Image (spheres, helix red, strand yellow):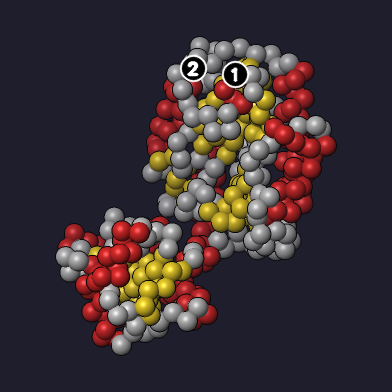
Amino acid sequence: MQSKRISQLRTLMERQGLEALLITNATNRLYMTGFTGSAGYVLLTGQRAVLLTDFRYMTQAPQQAQGYEVIEHAPSPLETVRSLLQSEGLSRLGFEQQDVSYGAYLAYSQVLSGIELVATDKLVETLRMVKDDTEIAVMQEAADLADRTFHHIVGLLKPGVSERDIALEIELFVRRNGAASTSFETIVASGERSALPHGKASDRIIGTDEFVKLDFGAYYKGYCSDITRTVVVGKPSDKHQEIYGIVLEAQLEALSRIRPGMTGREADAVARDVIKRHGYGDYFGHGLGHGLGMEVHEAPRLSTQGDIVLEPGMVVTVEPGIYLPGFGGVRIEDDIVITDTGNRRLTQSSKDLIVIP
């Protein structure tokens, strides 16, 4: 797996005229090498693939980073980078501009004096957008765990329980069942707070005749899942049923039509048009979805700004919503993988409006 990724990245480097690339982003380092340690740098040239790390990992790193030379770097890692570049006579180095602060760039310029520094834009992230079969299998497991978590938590929802208690139980359940953690800080938003798209769990006590929005995921074997379901505790009003039905219609329409060759903008428009048609366009203020993988938010984006064309192997979320201030909100979210002919759902939890007496 690592050798294929090295080859793919070298192809991207050649297109940009890069003699070498320094990878400093921790997620990209893990993706390229399989090394799970907390510190290290990857230096890739046309001839060498090197993982630089410190004394703590000199036993672990060679075991995990198959296909890489593992070198213990000097107290200043950039000194080792300079020596390696000089040994190959290289003078043009790409760096990850999203991961390098201005202060770090100044240090690069000083220590690597005489070497041309070239800012690169998400080269490794471009590779990460398209998942292989092994990655998709792990992401299916992460989605399955999210589904089991939702089934478990529905049985605990009732008036008198705090949002924070529900969020804690979600965290405990995913960890007890094999996840390292949740994918992000769990969202539990009830009553009027469900109108907050990212209403993190508070001390609010769940009441009756109101929405409860649950948005969470499992970080499992290095990959994320992300699911949202909205339920009603007590008796749903006509307004509850109306906006839930519209969001569900928008989500199902998007799931039926998302396919390879479509841009993220086009996918977003499918669901957005449904919500606009019902008169709630002003209350759907975020994008339809986002890429999912080793991080919970990756490329491509399904939004009005989404220019990337969807390809088989990409995993994205589909999560339209309507949020009415002072009343409440609904979001329904699934994880899907783009296939050769359309898409396949990874999350399978019921989307019928669940009413908890």
Picture quarter with the C terminus: top right
Q: Residue at x 71, y 48 (%)?
A: 268
| Horizontal and vertical percent position of residue 306 | 65, 55
Q: Pointer 1: residues within 10 angstroms few (<14), some, or many (20+)? A: many
Q: Nearer the viewer, residue 146 or 277?
A: 277
* Residue 17 in sight here: yes
Please tell me whether residue 333 is drawn above or below residue 191 in the rendered image: below
Which residue is at the far right? 277
Horizontally, is 226 left or right of 182 in the view?
right
Amino acid at dot 1? Gly
The amino acid pointed to by label 2 is: Arg
> To which quarter of the image does residue 353 belong?
top right
Q: In x, y percent, where is residue 42?
A: 34, 69
Q: Is 303 placed above or below 59 here? A: above
Q: Pointer 1: what residue?
A: 191
224 lies left or right of 309: left
Q: Is residue 77 above or below residue 207?
A: below
Q: Which quarter of the figure is the N terminus placed in?
A: bottom left
The residue under the point 30% across, 68% down is: 108
- Secondary structure category for the residue under label 1: helix
Mark pair 2, 1: CA separation: 9 Å
Disc with the residue nearer the chain's start (2 vs 1): 1
Residue indicated by mark 2: 204
Are the residues flagged by discs 2 and 1 in contact, CB closer than 8 Å? yes
At x 62% / y 37%, what residue is drawn?
Answer: 349
What is the count of numbered marks? Answer: 2
Please say if 69 is above or below 219: below
Identity of the residue drawn at 45% across and 36% down: 185
